[in-house]
Image: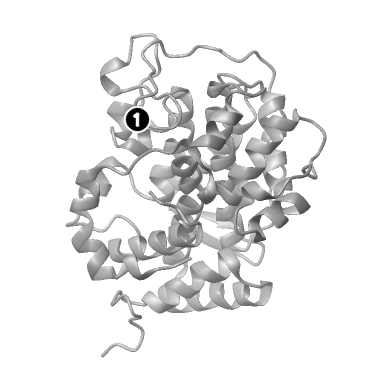
Amino acid sequence: MTSIDVGEGQLPIRTELAMVVEDAWRRLTQPGTWWGGAQRRAIAAEARNTRNCGLCRRRKDALSPYTVDGSHDDLGELHDDVVEAIHRLASDAGRITERWVREITSSAVSEEGYVEIISIVAIITALDTFDHALGRPQRPLPAAQPGEPGRQRPKGAKRNLAWVSTLAPEDVEPSDPNPYPIHGVSNIHRALSLVPQEVFNFFDLDVELYLGKEEFFDHEHEHRAISRAQIELVAGRASAINGCFY
Amino acid sequence: MDENKGESCVSNGALLTKFVEAILQGTYAEQLAARQSVRATLGDAAFVDTCATVASFNSVVKIADGTGIPLEDAKETKTMEMRDSLRLNEFRR
């Protein structure tokens, strides 16, 4: 165990959790596979900015977000289609449809770029939610790191499972980053696999926020300071509030 | 009967449910109160792990929803008993 500063004092935190949180912050603004460091930083900033968007508020309040047109209140750093993707994921992901995904990935946002956006939005949401839940102030985004994105799409990726292409474990090639031996082969691990590094980026963090592969299947031991039943209750309520079908 | 067991029959279930709701939907005052309650009842290490779990599931949902990944049949079957015992299927938005 180590400790984390929550302003009014220190709280105990698992050392592994503290480490992966810091690592996640660092990776957030490093060059990714399809977006550079500055772009990834801008995506994270725009995800945070979504709470200030009037269009997103009107859409959230509407019976269907697809009946409300308009322009997003954005930070002006990214293409409109990128902003649309970010804001929808950040504010109303539970009502995303396959048709919307098809439209977004036929726009200025490539399918690969969209998947990386999903990961960045998920990661900044995780980090910010953790700080918020603890009662910590929002952390400034790290400076963008220089370097070019890798721009390598797995040759074996296919659109045969989800609304985006995914890379099945049996189709991983030696040149692909392979998260499956470490994180498992559930569909949720496959979801971001069109950009395999993002599976690492999110789940390297999530295994300490939630549970890792071995811990998940171990119902005989407790791995956290709350019980498994308590973990699943919290998880279930958070998922329900988000309207998540998975 | 343990008065701290909510409708889910999980120890301190009502407290934890209230915490999640406060953090994700509540007012500033509700959040303050919820944090204090969890820390006082479950302890600081449990509080941090609860916060971590909320963070996980407030974020992973975006991956599932954004990609349209389907739930595995086996997972739905395997978790049926757990979901029934925790009464998770009764949760509504």
* Picture coordinates of residue A141, whole percent (x, y): 70, 39
Chain ID, mark 1: A
- For numbered disc 1, what is the local secondary structure? loop
Query: In the picture shown, does residue A84 fall above or below A128?
Result: above
Give B10 or A110, whichever is nearer the viewer: A110
* Picture coordinates of residue B46, whole percent (x, y): 42, 65
- Answer left or right for A189 relative to A99: left
* Picture coordinates of residue B10, whole percent (x, y): 30, 74
**To which quarter of the image does residue A173 belong?**
top left
* Picture coordinates of residue A25, whole percent (x, y): 60, 38
**To which quarter of the image does residue B84 belong?**
bottom left
Give A158 or A211, whichever is nearer the viewer: A158
**Residue type indicated by callout 1:** Leu
Graded by Cα atoms within 10 Å as few (under 14), some (14 to 19) or many (20 or more), the crowding at tag 1 reads some
Q: Which residue is mark 1?
A: A161
* Residue B34 in sight in this render: yes
Identify the residue at horizontal 57%, vertical 26% (top origin). Answer: A105
Query: In the picture shown, does residue B47 fall above or below A130?
Result: below
